[in-house]
Amino acid sequence: MTNEELLKLALHCNRCGTCRGVTQDAVPDPAFSTQCPSGMTFFGAYEPGGLMYIARGIATGAFPWDETIANYLFACTLCGYCDDLCSRGYRHTPAIAILEELRRIVPQELKPRGLKKAAQSVRKPAADRLSVLKAYGLADLSDGGTAETLIFCDRFLIANGPKLRELGFLMKKSGKRAGFFGKDPLPPVDAILLNAGCQDVLEKSMKEIDSRLNAHGVKQVICYHPEALSVLRRFSRSGADFIPVTRLYAEMLRKKPAKKLKLPAVTYQDPCHLGRYTQDYQSPRKVIAGLGLKLKEMWRSGNDSLCCGAGGSMLLANPKLARRYAVNRIEEARATGAKVIITACPNCMVNLKQAEPKAMKVVDITSLVAQAYGYKGKAWVI
Ligand code: SF4
Ligand code: SF4
């Protein structure tokens, strides 16, 4: 994007303030009326409208990059709420495109060290990590052959044996004849790359992924990690349908009911990349109902949900800030009276857990579904 193009996009914003959140008189508690994690914590330039005006300044050269401006930028979790809310009004400022562009052009030395390091370490995973999936009847497409359905193994899954086994178990239960790339894994398409402004690396990986999906006849790709799902949906040109695991679970529970789980009342954290970026608010809720659980919604839920604070790779860029944001969410979860927070994203899990380890139990929806279908293996514990 050129500076002129950036300016053109940023000029959509007139700082109307709508993206701060829902109207005060509609909320039961004013503490739950704002939806931008950085804006509600620091105000002013940290709010989406402030960031849009900073984008104007950067594009015109009126604001030279410095540490203060980089701090505003990297306090944002790229949750997408401002973009979504702005699009519901009389104008649409494409806030995410603008914020991602700012992260692309910010000078290297102003990027948070943890984020930069993580982005540099994103590389093709080792060949032997995924072979465990074969035990569940999944075919390694690296050996040749075709499969209409593929399970996409993201960076988190590859590093997490217990979760991989739970998924393998559920894939077998679903009866889907799926494949995976084991001996020759697909290159990673991590949201870290976008968050760190490395779009060029992402685009290169995507070309390889697309050509391999097409060469092996893949039509449907099941994604565990919402970040991988949203990145694949946005950037793939393969024509394949990218779906979240929660959609698979919802279908399974409809066709073949599982054991009802006995848990105290639960609440649900919408992961930004599953909800706002992929527009799937329903399948996790269907799964929760299918498991026989009583759901108590937080005030900010569905398309008005509040990011847990881990978006934008905040756990790498600024873990203390991620924790601070998560405390807000825990407060709201507690206010529902629920004892358990269910989520469908490992980043939400880690962040909510680190915010208040004893306050509430935080569980992954995949573990619950596996348990309901009789999985007896070791669960992923944080
Ligand atoms: S991003 Fe949209 S909703 Fe937010 S201040 Fe700008 S114009 Fe208003
Ligand atoms: S993307 Fe989220 S955190 Fe960033 S400015 Fe918009 S609402 Fe705030």
Image (tube, rainbow, N blue to C red):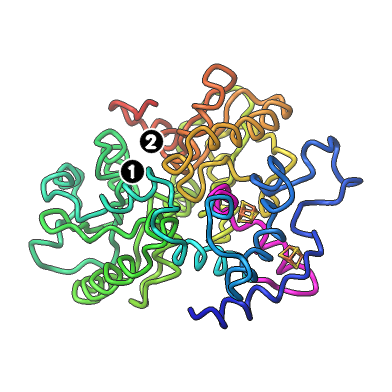
Badge 2: few (under 14), some or many (20 or more) residues near its Cα, within 10 Å?
Answer: many
- Find disc 2 in the rendering and name its residue: 370
Left or right: where 335 falls relative to 210: right
At horizontal 47% and vertical 38% (from top left) the residue drawn is: 365
Q: Residue 255 at x, y = what percent?
A: 46, 50
Picture layout, residue 151 above or below residue 242: above
Left or right: where 133 falls relative to 322: left
- In the rendered structure, which segment of residues is drawn in magenta? 71-93
Which of 84 and 137 lies nearest the eye of the viewer? Answer: 84
What residue type is disc 2 on? Answer: Ala
- Find disc 1 in the rendering and name its residue: 170
Split into 4 quadrants, where in the image is the C terminus? top left
Q: Residue 287 at x, y = what percent?
A: 53, 44
Queried whether the magenta region covers residue 262, the answer comes back as no
Which of 102 and 354 lies nearest the eye of the viewer? Answer: 102
Which of 357 and 118 lies nearest the eye of the viewer? Answer: 118
Q: Residue 235 at x, y = what percent?
A: 40, 71
Q: Secondary structure at mark 1?
A: helix
Quarter of the figure with residue 78: bottom right
Queried whether the magenta region covers residue 86, the answer comes back as yes
- Between discs 2 and 1, the one toward the N terminus: 1
